[in-house]
Amino acid sequence: MDNINLEKQHAAIAAATLIKNGMTVGLGTGSTVAFFLKALAKRIKQENLSIIGVTTSFKTAIIAQKLGIKIIDIDDAKTIDLTVDGADEVDYDMNGIKGGGAAFLMEKIVANNSKRVVWIVDSQKVHLKLGLMPLPLEVVPFGSGKLMTKLGKQHLYPTWRKTDGRLLVTDMGHYIVDLSLKAIDQPSELARYLDGQIGIIEHGLFLGIADEIIIGTATGVKHLLRTD
């Protein structure tokens, strides 16, 4: 196993220890979460835990069910005790960019309906300032070309996200636009601007959402904890 995957595994295993019997758990999306799902499934089997999962993507639902984790729809969950998810990039203020897996709309819905949110990342995902990773937008197909032109005029450097040469379509039937910003000096101001644009369903800025970030290292984990 290479160093990055080892770090992901360390973070994932640490997060799995947070799960308690009887919990309803939000299950995120991505390569680090894949390690978490395996670790959680192992605990469920070994300790005979009663755990219910609420997933943030169709892909996660399929993986979780194959591992024997019971899945229910978010609207059928009375509460979500804890959500464990990954992130493409985080800063030391515990803000993040998510959406590399094109599931950030569902991820944000699940997170906002959770009592506690924990992100698991490898050490290379931690930066002093957000923006090195492209910032994704989930947009309505109708009029999306007009929106692209407007974003370009605002010097936000939008590009369509494609797969196999075609525009990527999310689980919710929308398109993804990535903003190549390099650095985001004022994430809150940018989030407010994007929130106000007609046609943008959601953006990948996750500000003030994570309660804890578990950072995998070569030898173990480090923790960032929200104190406010």
Image: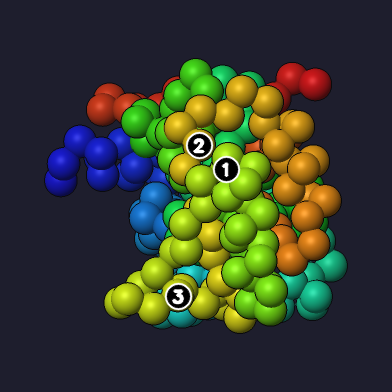
Separation of residues labelled 1 and 3 (CA atoms): 19 Å
Going by the image, does 74 lie left or right of 105? Answer: right
Tell me the crowding category of disc 2: few under 14, some 14 to 19, or many 20 or more residues within 10 angstroms, Cα based. Answer: some
Apparent side of residue 218 relative to residue 130 in the rendered image (left or right): left
- Left or right side of 116 for 29: left
Which residue is painted at 57% across and 43% down in the image? 156
From the viewer's perspective, is residue 190 above or below residue 32? above
Based on the displayed image, in which of its 4 quarters is residue 63 positioned?
A: bottom left
Q: Is residue 208 above or below residue 138?
A: above
Residue 82, horizontal then vertical, whole percent: 68, 50
Q: Residues within 10 Å of mark 1 (few under 14, many from 20)?
A: some
Disc 2 and disc 1 in contact, CB within 8 angstroms: yes
Q: Which residue is mark 2?
A: 181
2 or 1: mark nearer the eye: 1
Which residue is most to the left? 1
The residue indicated by pointer 1 is 156
